[in-house]
Image (cartoon, grey):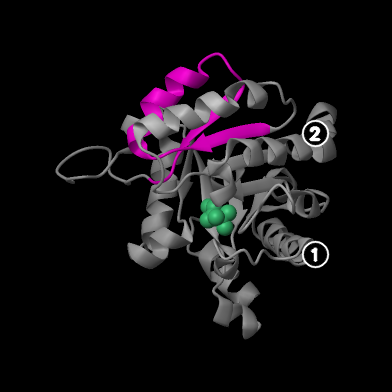
Amino acid sequence: MRVPMIAGNWKMNTTVGEAIELVNKMRQGLDQIDNVEKVLCPPFISLAAVKELIEGSSIKLGAQNIYFEEKGAYTGEISPLMLADLCEFVIIGHSERRQYFNETGEMIDKKVKAALKVGLKPILCIGERLEENEAGRTEEVLTKQLSSSSDRIYYFSGLILAYEPIWAIGTGRAATGEQANETIGFIRQYISKRYGKRVAQDVCILYGGSVTADNISEFINQPEIDGALVGGASLKADQFLRIVKQTSEIKGHLSEEG
Ligand code: 13P
């Protein structure tokens, strides 16, 4: 059975001091909530400080990006080996990286493999643009994003997927629970056809895009949606806590049964 997950993607927000302050505000509350995987993804420079603060708690740590080479002359990049010591998860292929930093399917595939190689769990993001959605091309776009990945089965057994429709990110215009459920159901079907039912049933698939404490229940109540990748609302301790709490109340029992 899949364990529900709420991951906070802080994006390029918070200085180290602000990151510490934010974690201090939510650490105790988050730690007390059972049956949900709680993941914080601060900027690289705050990973070490946050790691120290959450030591001994049930809160997990993730990075927002990775480079695929192990080490060498790649000025400014962070390698899988450097992250493996610091955190358990890493967001890969976020639409902002595809859009502003020209990350291609091929690069994203290399990053996922590099992360898995050192034991990091990738949170692989996929999603369609507004015009693609309006043209009824969502499934085609997602299929392309999913198929630019490796065809090895271990790949999908080791990662978390996040469906983030680009038109819903930071816009306040979230998908509806039904829309997101239907599309995530499609993603699961695709994985089932390609890798088998077992892999598809086990893969954790999150929804992301304008999730707040006021709409989280709409998503979590859907059978195909295993949790959320939260942007803006993860920067507010009370909002993030309310999101995790509702997830535990609605879906937490699933991890106990599993
Ligand atoms: P918002 O929750 O701010 O829309 O961001 C979603 C996102 O991109 C998470 O990765």
Residue occupying the point 60% across, 65% down: 168
Q: How far across and down, in percent of the image, does residue 25 sit?
A: 56, 27
Tag 1: amino acid: Glu
**Magenta residues (range):** 37-65
Label 1 beta carbon less than 8 Å to ligand 1: no
Q: How far across and down, in percent of the image, does residue 92 sit?
A: 45, 50
Tag 2: amino acid: Gly
Q: In this view, does 199 lie above or below 174?
A: above
Horizontal side of residue 63 vs 177, given as left or right: left
- For mark 2, does the 10 Å Cα neighbourhood hold few (<14), some (14 to 19), or many (20 or more) residues? many
- Whether residue 1 is visible here, answered yes or no, is no
Q: Is residue 132 above or below residue 182?
A: below
Horizontal side of residue 244 vs 132, given as left or right: right
Q: Earlier in the sequence, mark 2 or mark 1?
A: 1
Q: Is residue 213 above or below residue 101?
A: above
Residue occupying the point 59% across, 47% down: 233
Residue 234 appears in which quarter of the rendering?
Answer: top right
Residue occupying the point 65% across, 59% down: 194
Q: Mark 1 points at which residue?
A: 178
